Image: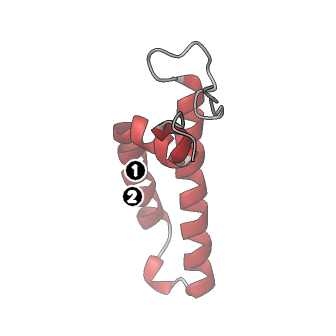
Amino acid sequence: MNENITNAVLSPIILTAINRHGLIIFVVSNLMTGMVNLSINTLAVGNAGALLILILYVVAIAGLALVLDVVFPPAGTDTATSAMQVKKES
């Protein structure tokens, strides 16, 4: 393996984005959970419905994390697509 590979290259993009914006992701996740619990009778939902709710929930949270990482890049970067780019060091 190349010695110049950084941790940013080795860590998944979504996990890095969630780590950078943890508080916002936490608050939005809790609000989404409350909205689902208030709007859907979760005890009456079948297996397929529950799986669909979970998949939509995960996609929404991961999408939010990536959007936040593009809109609010980490300090010290000059581009707005920090999570989307993998820098290759020579």
Dot 2: element = helix
Distance (Cα) linking label 1 and label 2 = 5 Å
Which amino acid, mark 1? Leu
Mark 1 Cα-neighbour bin, 10 Å: few <14, some 14–19, many ≥20: few
User: Relative to residue 7, is residue 56 depicted above or below?
Assistant: below
Q: Residue at x 52, y 50 (%)?
A: 61
Question: Residue 48 appears in which quarter of the rendering?
Answer: bottom right
Circles 1 and 2: CB atoms closer than 8 Å: yes
User: Relative to residue 62, is residue 90 depicted above or below?
Assistant: above
Q: Is residue 38 left or right of residue 77?
A: left
What quarter of the picture does the C terminus occupy?
Answer: top right
Q: Which residue is mark 1?
A: 31
Q: Please name whichever residue, 31 or 88, is drawn nearer the observer in this view of the structure.
A: 88
Mark 2 Cα-neighbour bin, 10 Å: few <14, some 14–19, many ≥20: few
Q: Please name whichever residue, 62 or 42, is drawn nearer the observer in this view of the structure.
A: 62
The label number, if any, that marks residue 84 in the structure image: none
Q: Please name whichever residue, 28 or 14, is drawn nearer the observer in this view of the structure.
A: 14
Q: Residue at x 42, y 52 (%)?
A: 29
Q: Residue at x 62, y 72 (%)?
A: 52
Query: How many numbered marks appear?
Result: 2
Q: Is residue 7 left or right of residue 46?
A: left
Dot 1: element = helix
